[in-house]
Image: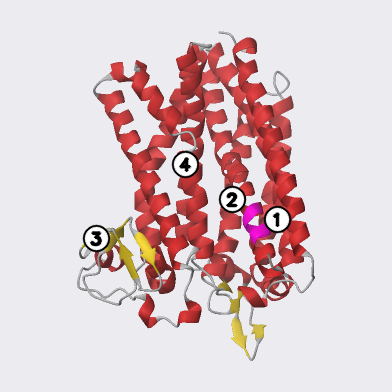
């Protein structure tokens, strides 16, 4: 493994690890706040117990997310110094604001965890809401910085110099809204289905059923509503990518030839040498309609893009297919759940529905990882789209491969520790909150 590949692999590993904890940190406090609100409004002890149990999970993920996020901030400077030298003054504002949001989140979480029976009950609840709002703001701000890499603006690039810098314009670039909306909904989908699935598993085991039923209901509602909205945000994102990054769209769809009435490709095996997709299901005209709103509009193919500007087509296409496919599965499960709520409540007690939610535990996070692969790999070979190539931004420092091995070991260790802590917490729930 050469140093360039090692640097990219280390960044990919760090991002792939951190994004799980970031998404949970964005979403779980809202679950916690809803349970807490129900406790204050109804006085049912079970909701207080759900709130306390979830707050411990929030604390675990907050601590782990803080560690992995801090590592990422160092890696940006150490692995990509040229990028940070030029880009830092332009898109540094969302990172600065994210630090402020993180600071507020930490304070509010401390108040919430240690404020039971010490604060006014509604003020205590409000501190939990602030944890959620600040965590969500942190996520959106980081996504805004990433969106700038896909849609660089807020500066002029003249003779190799970045001038007339406008950090506000850079932060609110053309891609920030579509990426932030899509990522936020994805976080609610993934976390909601994961949490609901864990509680469904405990219901099946017959452990503290009343407690887990209440928790399952809250998580499932968040997950299913977000899953229904997610395709709408995906459509917004696809149209945005079609306008700004035609090479990425072409790689996502393995679309090699520029043509009107372009077909949407579902599945298939990509052959980059022959520039075709074998064994795929193709829906005529659907790609043109989804990307541009009209079947007769041409969709740019990779043949009209310089070959040295092509993203890795196969991996981008496969990742995109995984993301969309899993999203459709979770959408189908959401529709089944809504039918159960509206028409046949006996389904809510059925083993098969619980089994479907248990199967769905990892699906949202796999879809998130696949989606970030599309976003990052689909932007290649650019680290700043159309301005700076990734190969020109990497550190000249030798021996990065050893750093990659070290960080791999660290992240694997953290994963084991977090899994152990969560397992212990879930086991303790039935003993401590037996209602």
The residue carrying mark 4 is: 364
Number of the front mark, 4 or 2: 4
- Using the image, determine if residue 127 lies above or below residue 435: below
Q: Secondary structure at mark 4?
A: helix
Residue at 37%, 82% (x, y): give it.
304
Q: Mark 2 or mark 1: name the one nearer the start of the chain.
A: 1
Cα separation, mark 1 vs mark 4, equals 23 Å
- Of 317 and 48, nearer the camera is 317
What SS does tag 2 mark? helix
How is colour applied across the structure in the image?
Answer: secondary structure
Foreground tag (3 vs 2) = 3
Q: Could you tell me residue 420's position as x and y percent? A: 68, 28
The residue to which callout 3 is attached is 282
Which residue matches tag 2?
139
Is 353 placed above or below 381 here? above
Q: Which residues are magenta?
A: 9-13
Q: Is residue 74 visible?
A: no
Residue 148 percent location from the top left of the image:
56, 67
Label 2 – label 1 distance at C-alpha:
14 Å
Name the mark nearer the viewer: 2 or 1: 1
């Amino acid at each position: 493994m050469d140093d360039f590949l090692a640097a990219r692999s280390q960044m990919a590993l760090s991002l792939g690890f951190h994004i799980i904890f970031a998404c949970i940190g964005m979403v779980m406090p809202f679950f916690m706040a809803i349970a807490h609100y129900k406790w204050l409004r109804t006085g049912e002890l079970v909701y207080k117990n759900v709130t306390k149990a979830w707050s411990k999970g929030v604390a675990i993920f907050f601590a782990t997310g803080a560690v992995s996020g801090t590592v990422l901030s160092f890696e940006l400077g150490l692995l990509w110094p040229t990028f940070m030298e030029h880009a830092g003054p332009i898109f540094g504002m969302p990172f600065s604001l994210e630090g402020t949001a993180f600071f507020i989140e930490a304070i509010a979480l401390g108040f919430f965890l240690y404020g039971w029976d010490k604060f006014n009950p509604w003020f205590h609840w409000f501190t939990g809401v602030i944890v959620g709002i600040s965590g969500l703001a942190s996520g959106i701000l980081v996504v805004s910085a990433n969106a700038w890499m896909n849609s660089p603006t807020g500066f002029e690039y003249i003779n190799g110099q970045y001038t007339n810098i406008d950090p506000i314009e850079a932060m609110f670039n053309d891609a920030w809204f579509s990426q932030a909306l899509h990522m936020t909904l994805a976080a609610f989908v993934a976390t909601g289905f994961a949490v609901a699935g864990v509680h469904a598993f405990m219901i099946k085991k017959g452990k503290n059923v009343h407690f887990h039923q209440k928790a399952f209901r809250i998580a499932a509602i968040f997950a299913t509503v977000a899953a229904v909205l997610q395709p709408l945000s995906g459509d917004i994102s696809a149209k945005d990518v079609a306008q700004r990054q035609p090479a990425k769209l072409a790689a996502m769809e393995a679309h090699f030839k520029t043509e009107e009435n372009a077909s949407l490709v579902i599945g298939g095996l990509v052959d980059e040498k022959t520039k075709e997709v074998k064994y795929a299901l193709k829906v005529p005209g659907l790609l043109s309609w989804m990307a541009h709103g009209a079947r007769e509009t041409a969709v740019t193919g990779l043949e009209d893009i310089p070959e040295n500007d092509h993203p890795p087509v196969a991996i981008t296409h496969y990742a995109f297919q995984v993301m969309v496919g899993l999203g459709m599965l979770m959408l189908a499960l959401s529709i089944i759940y809504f039918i159960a709520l509206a028409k046949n409540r006996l389904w809510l007690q059925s083993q098969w529905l619980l089994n479907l939610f248990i199967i769905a535990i990892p699906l949202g996070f796999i879809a998130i990882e696949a989606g970030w692969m599309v976003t990052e790999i689909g932007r290649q070979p650019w680290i700043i789209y159309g301005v700076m190539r990734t190969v020109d931004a990497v550190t000249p420092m030798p021996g990065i491969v050893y750093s990659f091995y070290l960080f791999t070991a660290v992240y694997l260790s953290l994963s084991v520790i977090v899994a152990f802590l969560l397992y212990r917490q879930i086991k303790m729930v039935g003993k401590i909150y037996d209602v």
